[in-house]
Amino acid sequence: MHGDLHVYAAQPGPVPAVPRQLPASPAVFTGRMSELAALDHALIATTPGGRESAAVLISAIGGVGGIGKTWLALAWAHRNLHRFPHGQLFVDLQGFSPSGRPVEAADAVRGFLHSLGADPDGLPSGLDALSALYRSSVAGRRMLIVLDNAATAEQVVPLLPGSPTCTVLVTGRTTLPTLIDRYGAHHLQLDVLTHDEARELLTTRLDQRAEADPEATGELIGLCGRHPLALAIIARQAITRPRVPLAELAVELGDLALEVLDHDTDPAGSLPAVLSWSLRHFTGRQRRAFALLGIAPGPDIGLPAAYRLLGLSPADARRVLRVLEDSSLLDRRPDGRYSMHDLVRAYAASIAHHSLPEPVRRAASDRIVDFYLHTAHTAERLLNPHREPIRPVPGSRSRPPTGHADALDWLEVHHPHLLAAQRTAASLGRHEAVWRLAWALSTFHQRREHHHDALAVWQGAAEAASHLPDPAAGTIARERLGRAHAELGRHEEAVRLLHQALDLAGRHDDRTQQAHAHRVLTRVWEIRNDHQRALVHAREALRLFRDLAEPAWVANALNSVGWFSAHLGDHGTARDHCRQALEVYRHHSSASGVADTLHSLGYIDFLSGNHHDAISHYRQALAVYRDLGYSIPAAGTLHDLGHSHLGLGQRDETRAVWNEALELYRQQGHRTAADRVRRQLDKLLSAGHDATI
């Protein structure tokens, strides 16, 4: 070898680019601790053997527009930057954005490859080749890829790395089944903030103003429904109008709702605009369904009611509801019920009123009112089969309850929907439906002691009755209004209305309604503890019902005569009338009437000193009330049963039944009755062997 020896170091290869594409962390981020913890848990999850997962970690964050999906993703990402030393990639796929043009997957991949140092001029043209090159570029690197605002799986799948060292966060309003089914994505559905989180958000942004007026702050939180974007908009309005009190903003928001949360020039700062982006991919049927759900009466809707509202077959309705649910515009609750956030619902209602033809809205409202009316009518007939029925509208469809307990459960669940349906019927000028809905709720309101609601529905019915040809409608409305006023302690108004009802019934020679007015007057005077006057009306009701050959109402009047006779000390007359009532009720299979009369017989026995017989009658009544699900009369029967046990010196039995009555009264919210029983228990405890309570 001749010459000099030269040693050269190998030329270093290109240094891999370390992209830092994350947008800034949200300036104000509050709450979401459980969601952040869920993302942490997903990141560190291992297989049962302790090895790291062999699949890429994908977390899909879903939720309605403005709920804070991107904020959560960015907040979590910035808190975990140390876990991704080889960089972070971010792309807004614009699945739901003002432009209305989602980013093509190929364009997003090219952007990522360019950020990773690839020569733009040397990139392949096809999507599959681009995705393969992208996966090769991130293989083995600890990177975070944030795919924000995705609309479809087609946008996302080509951007998924193949290396388990990478982590992917996907945000979007729609559920992406492919990511969950094929790629094992962890789905995290965002809901509204908790009340404390919402208050922290306003307090952080508004400083002393929120703390200085906690009542107005709480009202704003409630009106915004704890929706993050709505709260941010209200905070911005408060910041830009520092002289306007928060209480004034709350009044404005309460009066104008979505108008306050709108913005003419900045779509991203307008809640209606943000929500509208969710509808772009909907079919006409899906948009129509979304709008109609906004005007459905009641706080939520079940499947049978939804079928009628939408005018679709059950299968088609389920498909449409599933689309709305997957788009985070509808929330599926237990027992097949669906609900919307109040602001989403307000937006849906605005679409219904501005975009749907009036005949379409009217037909849907008629269908849903008819559904609630006739199902409630069926339920009422099961609760009170001997009550004079109303005639259903021919061709109407209902979801009939299958028995007494089912009827009571249905009315319990749908009570707010029935109240709202009556208001809807009134707005449509459907006077007969307004009156009939009040009628169908009567037994339920009486059994559950919903006296304020009874007053409200019969006030509507009284107004509707003035438009109806049947004079009995006005008579019955006054009778029912009189009872509601009496139960609420408004004695003079109750008596005035009931005597109006008697006068109207007399002018039209309506002996049936005369009898019912007297029947209700017995209750009015009972509330006033005037048992003598109550007995007079009970006897008059009995006479009229006997003339009318109405056996169920005859039994009701017989029991009333017996009850008031017992209070006036005529135990023989009381027992005789109640035994007659019991025989009639049993003959006509009226379980509630049997229970009421057995309770009356127990009370007569108690007053007569026949405590063993009283206990027997009370326990028989109690068993029937429990079978019927009537917790209010059951509580009263337990209370009276305790006195009969005490009359026999059975202190342990007395304590047991009074404790049971106390628990029922507490569950029902009957504080006065609960306090009375509590005092009796305290006295029983301190009375020693003294049996006088």
Image (spheres, rainbow, N blue to C red):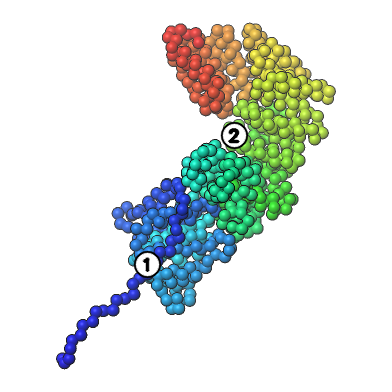
Left/right placement of residue 527 relative to residue 463 reads left
- Residue nearest the viewer, comparing 685 with 180: 685
In the picture, the disc for residue 18 is 1
Give the SS element for disc 1.
loop
Of the image marks 2 and 1, the number of the one nearer the N terminus: 1
Residue at 73% of width from left, 32% of height from top? 461
Q: Nearer the viewer, mark 2 or mark 1?
A: 1
Residue type at the position of mark 1: Val
Q: Residue 255, position in %: x, y?
A: 65, 43
Horizontal side of residue 12 vs 253, given as left or right: left
Q: Amino acid at mark 2?
A: Glu
Residue identifier under label 2: 412
At horizontal 55% and vertical 27% (from top left) the residue drawn is 668
Number of other residues with Cα within 10 Å of mark 1, as a class: few under 14, some 14 to 19, many 20 or more: some
Mark 2 lies on a secondary structure that is helix
Where does residue 323 sit, x and y in percent of width and height?
57, 54
Work out whether 268 lies above or below 682.
below
Q: Is residue 670 above or below residue 366?
A: above
In this orientation, does residue 229 appear? yes
Q: Position of residue 480 (x, y in %)?
A: 71, 26
